[in-house]
Amino acid sequence: MTATTEENPITRSVVPGHRRPDLQGMRAIAVLTVFANHLFDWPPGGFVGVDIFFVLSGFFITGILIQERTTKRKLSFKKFYIRRVKRILPSALLVLVVTVIGAHFLFPAARAKETLLDALYAAVFGANIRFEAVGTDYFQQNMPPSPLQHYWSLSIEEQFYFVWPLLLVTIFSLTRGFRRSGKSWARRLALFGAMFIVVAASFVWAMYLSANDPNRAYFSTFTRVWELGAGALLAIAGPWLLGLPSAMRPVLAYLGLAGVVASLFVVNPTVQFPAPWAALPIVSTALVVVSFHGAEVRGMLPLTNRVATYFGDTSYTLYLWHWPVIVLLVSVIPRGPLYTAVAIAVSLGLTALTYRFYEDPIRKSDWLLDKADHSRRNLFLAWGRPVWTTVGAFGAAIIVVAILGMAHAAKNSEVQAELASERQESQSELASPHEEKVDPCFGAPAMINSQCTLRNPSVPLQPSLDNFSTDRPREWNRCYTPKDEKLLSCSFGYDGADAKRIAIVGDSKGIFLLPALRKVLNANKWRLTTYLGKTCALMIPSKDECRGPMEEAEKQLLAHPYDLVIMANVSYGVEQQALRHRAAMEPIVAAGSRILVVADNPVSSEEAIACLTRVSLGSDRSGECGTPRAEAFPKPDTLVEGAHLVPGTAVVDLTPYYCNADRCPAVIGDVIVHSDATHITATLSRTLWRPIEDGVRRALDMPVNAPR
């Protein structure tokens, strides 16, 4: 006898007409913990709500696929993907369009362009690939994140469901003989075994990548398949779980709930994730799902109350809206009680309106269904479909044109800013900066000049709010070694036989000193050579990804000693790092070179950067934007500490040009300080030429500690 949908208790939760309150309650927990974590940074492990979603989704979708295949003897890919499109796309595309428009009006041009690119990737379910590629660090962000970053999880789910139905059908086809012989259990066992292999392989890969490249591990589809697969295994094993004793069900349910709550506090951004620590919320969620399998469990009010059910029903919509609201709103309202209240109200309001008047009607409509599947036809819809199709197509065309126009404008603005920066640097190198007419209140000097103000609203900001995030030195793309690549080296300045030979070695912090250094090279008869690499520092031992380029740099520094070696690096704050720096410095000094260490610049808080964005929306109060000094220097400068351990080294500390006693302003002398959270703008760098020149001169005057 062929089982019908109503007769199969295992799939009551995954077919229309049957709802499992436990799944809705778990969805509510998942979305509310994610929302709270994003808004309050509490609970610390709130991000595991996404992992809960993965398990539930794997269980839900696999149950649908198996139910259709076992009851109808076939699986319609067309109907499956139509259901997915109706469920996922309408709200997802609506939020994408609204967010891109909001970013256009609220963000600087460069960031608006990045949001547009994020939207394009998200629209084709590639958001996780995008964020993995750009190196988004989920746990250590200081720069304002993308308002569409949360689409990474939706992309992973849909990528999984592009492949999983095909694998399922293939296994059913290969095991057709088991059904004919009445061994349906063997068929299900084969399906379970195949998914178990996928889950095990994904978990092993997740363990490796979580330990070696946490950023890639977080966004990678292959490190998350095991979480979706865990839910799929539960759906496959459904009939085997029917005999679960009634007395055990509430025990398992509450044990699972306790595990979920524990994971919100035990799991945090410092643990290895997603493997193995995502296993705690995954297994805990599985216990809840198993406890309700084929039977009701009494006394589960935390999951079955009406509030939990409502948030479970609207969990997808709330997940879509909450993050763009949180990110966009900070560009209008500073973080604080008002911001929090508005963020909650707007997120819940948009969720309720979207679900009631847009998402649910579309999901229940006959849109995309064949005529044979129409149970009833609404006369208005029958008449109005051509009209609404035309309007929709026309509106989509307008949106596409507007988006392309925004992208072109942003790109053109970025190119013009880069060309202007190059012209300014080239012209400034032709003559001595001492002969230029220098405004003593422009840029960094304003910080130490009591006669200057940090911001004159009548003077345009440099770089502009549209271009500050792309205001990088021109050497960024040609004198800077990416990870795991051959060392790139450039030379600038005076090329006479009597030139003082100077090298600069380190990471990207060194690149951002070049605009200042290049202003003073020719006037002082200095020749500068770069040895700079991404996240690389001259240490012994070197980081694995820097070993090749940094060992090559060290070889050249020792073989042909320079008059001066300038070192610049981000502050790592690791105690042993100072000793590793010292171990690298000592051979250089022994070879006959002097060393000048440039202390790290302050970092910028997310609020300081968002504050600048708010400037463009009203009166210019950018002089009030900044980062508390204690927050701007979160870690000890181990490079400076290492220099203090080595005779023959000097240190130049530019902190007085960045900060006062209490804070580090975001704008100094009408110049925006940071291009991102950790790097200064090229424009500000050019205004630091005098203290850097003084530091280099003092270092060159030091006696050499070893024969040349």
Image: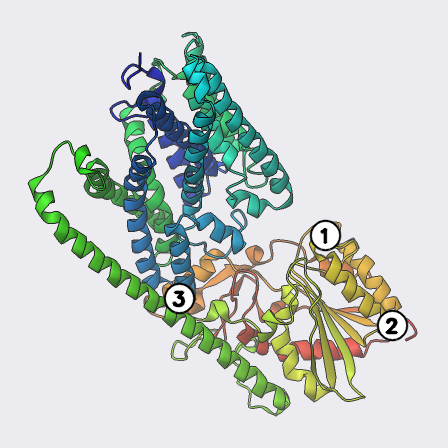
Q: Are marks 2 and 1 in contact (CB under 8 Å)?
A: no
Q: Helix, strand or loop at disc 2?
A: loop
The front one of 500 and 85 is 85
Say which label, 3 or 1, has the lower sequence index.
Answer: 3
Task: Using the numbered discs, state the Cα–Cα distance from disc 2 to disc 3 in whole angstroms.
Answer: 48 Å
Circle 1 residue: 544
Q: What's the residue at 10%, 44% (across, down)? A: 382
Circle 2 residue: 592
Q: Helix, strand or loop at disc 1?
A: helix
How packed mark 3 is, by other alpha carbons closer than 10 Å (few <14, some 14-19, many 20 or more), is: many
Q: Quadrant of residue 598?
A: bottom right
Say which label, 2 or 1, has the lower sequence index.
Answer: 1
In front: label 3 or label 1: 1
Q: What's the residue at 20%, 54% (across, down)? A: 392
Q: x%, y% of residue 664? A: 53, 64
Q: x%, y% of residue 406? A: 34, 67
The front one of 204 and 80 is 80
How packed mark 2 is, by other alpha carbons closer than 10 Å (few <14, some 14-19, many 20 or more), is: many
Amino acid type, label 3: Pro
Task: Using the numbered discs, state the Cα–Cα distance from disc 2 to disc 1 in whole angstroms.
Answer: 28 Å
Amino acid type, label 2: Gly
For the C terminus, the image quarter is bottom right
Asked if one can make out residue 254 in the rendered structure from this viewpoint, the answer is: no
Q: x%, y% of residue 577? A: 74, 53
Amino acid type, label 1: Asp
Q: Is residue 8 above or below residue 386?
A: above
Say which label, 2 or 3, has the lower sequence index.
Answer: 3
Q: Are marks 2 and 3 in contact (CB under 8 Å)?
A: no
Asked if one can make out residue 121 in the rendered structure from this viewpoint, the answer is: yes
The answer to whether 505 appears left or right of 592 in the picture is: left
The front one of 622 and 558 is 558
For the N terminus, the image quarter is top left
